[in-house]
């Protein structure tokens, strides 16, 4: 890592920018290797003070949307069954 920072310093990138670039590069390398592995069970979660709250809000929104979609699908299925019975009775 020190070598990488030194190389980047030589081309005019300061140590803080070099470190940030290395972290971003490592992050994308990790994502790429996860994507290449078909049996991976690794989950990357954001790590910041706000991340927990954001994840909770997203989960609640997802569950709410899922329930609404499920209820709409049940309603459509019930309507279809009801219209079939009416057709069969005629």
Image (cartoon, helix red, strand yellow):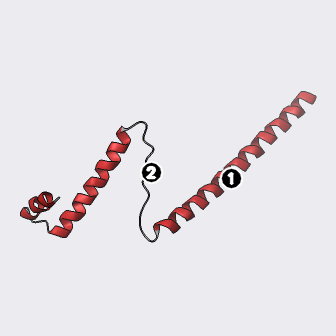
Q: Residue furthest left?
A: 10
SS at mark 1 in the image: helix
Q: Which residue is mark 2?
A: 43
Marks 1/2 in contact by CB < 8 Å: the verdict is no
Q: Which residue is mark 1?
A: 67
Residue toward you, 71 or 83: 71
Pair 1/2: label in front:
2
Q: Is residue 57 above or below residue 72?
A: below
Q: Which image quadrant is residue 26 in?
A: bottom left
Residue at 65% x, 57% y: name it: 64
Quarter of the picture containing the N terminus is bottom left
Q: Which mark is residue 41?
A: none
Location of residue 66 in the rendering, given as x and y in whole percent from the top left corner: 64, 51
Q: Is residue 24 above or below residue 34?
A: below
Location of residue 74 in the rendering, given as x and y in whole percent from the top left corner: 75, 44
Whether residue 67 sits left or right of residue 13 in the image: it is: right
* Dot 1 alpha-carbon crowd within 10 angstroms: few under 14, some 14 to 19, many 20 or more: few
Whether residue 23 sits left or right of residue 71 in the image: it is: left
Location of residue 39 in the rendering, given as x and y in whole percent from the top left corner: 43, 37
Quarter of the picture containing the C terminus is top right
Q: Earlier in the sequence, mark 1 or mark 2?
A: 2
SS at mark 2 in the image: loop
Inspect this view and state whether residue 15 appears. yes
Whether residue 42 sits left or right of residue 2 in the image: it is: right
Residue at 57% x, 59% y: name it: 59
Location of residue 18 in the rendering, given as x and y in whole percent from the top left corner: 18, 63
Inspect this view and state whether residue 90 appears. no
Q: Is residue 76 above or below residue 19?
A: above
Whether residue 86 sits left or right of residue 78 in the image: it is: right
Residue at 8% x, 62% y: name it: 11
Spatial separation of the CA atoms under disc 1 and disc 2: 25 Å
């Amino acid at each position: 890592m020190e070598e990488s920072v030194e190389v980047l310093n030589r081309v005019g990138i300061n140590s803080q920018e070099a470190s940030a670039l290395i972290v971003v590069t490592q992050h994308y390398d990790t994502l790429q290797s996860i994507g290449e592995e078909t049996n991976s069970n690794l989950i990357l979660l954001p790590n910041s003070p706000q991340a927990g709250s954001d994840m909770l809000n997203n989960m609640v929104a997802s569950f709410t949307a899922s329930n609404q979609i499920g209820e709409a699908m049940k309603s459509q299925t019930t309507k279809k069954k009801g219209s079939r019975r009416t057709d069969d009775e005629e």
